[in-house]
Amino acid sequence: MTQPAPHPGEPHDAGTSGRLNQLRAGVLGANDGIVSTAGIVVGMAAATTSGPVILSAGLAGVAAGALSMAAGEYVSVSTQRDTEKAMLATERIELREDPEAELDELAGLYEAKGLTPDLAHEVAVALTEKDALRAHAEVELHIDPDELTSPWQAAVASIVAFTIGGALPLLAVLLVPTTARIPVTFVAVVLALALTGSVSARLGQAPPGRATVRTVIGGALAMGVTYALGSAFDVSGM
């Protein structure tokens, strides 16, 4: 998943975009780890009381999910990075072939932000003399040339977060008495999803309430479906 470009008027310092990218990948990874692993272990707990069987299924699910999540993040963010590089390459060509038109374009962008024509032109000239590519990249493309998105950061953040998220329902289902496994896991997962849903919404500057409810309902539905499937294939007596 790719992160949205920052709003043109938002101030940002070096490293902010990269940290947000890691945090976004981490939150999404943790959420997916919680939901997918909870679905597996709840389904297995409904089908069997064997701790080793539930543990094996849960560990396999965490490993497969974490690797899949990391691979998906790497591919997605790599595509975003390639797009950013292509946009910067195009901008370099335009600056080299028609610098006057690019200067007028930059001045127009600052004028659209509310500066007077004279001041916009003055700012554009000053920034162009200092670093023309950076000036256009930040104002026109909303890219920091020295801080392109990192696919490796996103991949590592997601694999670690997925593993941590997946460990929660796995431990919840194994560390309590057999009769309490499913209700305890359900409660633990709902609370964890409420937290990740709220954090995810705040990262996207959205109202946390609605996003949290959606996340919790999605996780509860996943556990309900896998519980029904596990109950249908009850092998505890075999």
Image (cartoon, rainbow, N blue to C red):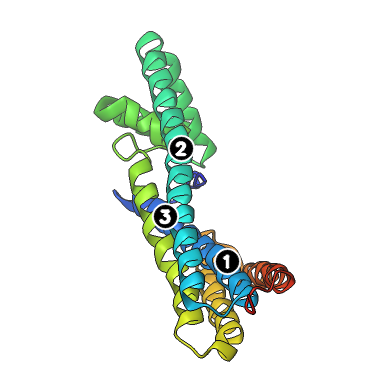
Q: Which residue is mark 1?
A: 40
- The residue nearer to you, when weighing 228 against 96, is 228
Q: Which residue is mark 3?
A: 158
Left or right, residue 147 beside residue 185: left
Question: Judging from the image, what secondary structure is the residue with disc 1 in?
Answer: helix
Question: Judging from the image, what secondary structure is the residue with disc 3 in?
Answer: helix
Q: Position of residue 49 (x, y in %)?
A: 57, 80
Q: CA distance from mark 1 to mark 3?
A: 19 Å
The residue under the point 39% across, 48% down is 154
Q: Position of residue 155 (x, y in %)?
A: 39, 48
Q: Is residue 150 visible?
A: no
The residue under the point 55% across, 87% down is 178
Q: Amino acid at mark 2?
A: Val
Graded by Cα atoms within 10 Å as few (under 14), some (14 to 19) or many (20 or more), the crowding at tag 1 reads many
Q: Amino acid at mark 3?
A: Ser
Q: Position of residue 159 (x, y in %)?
A: 39, 55
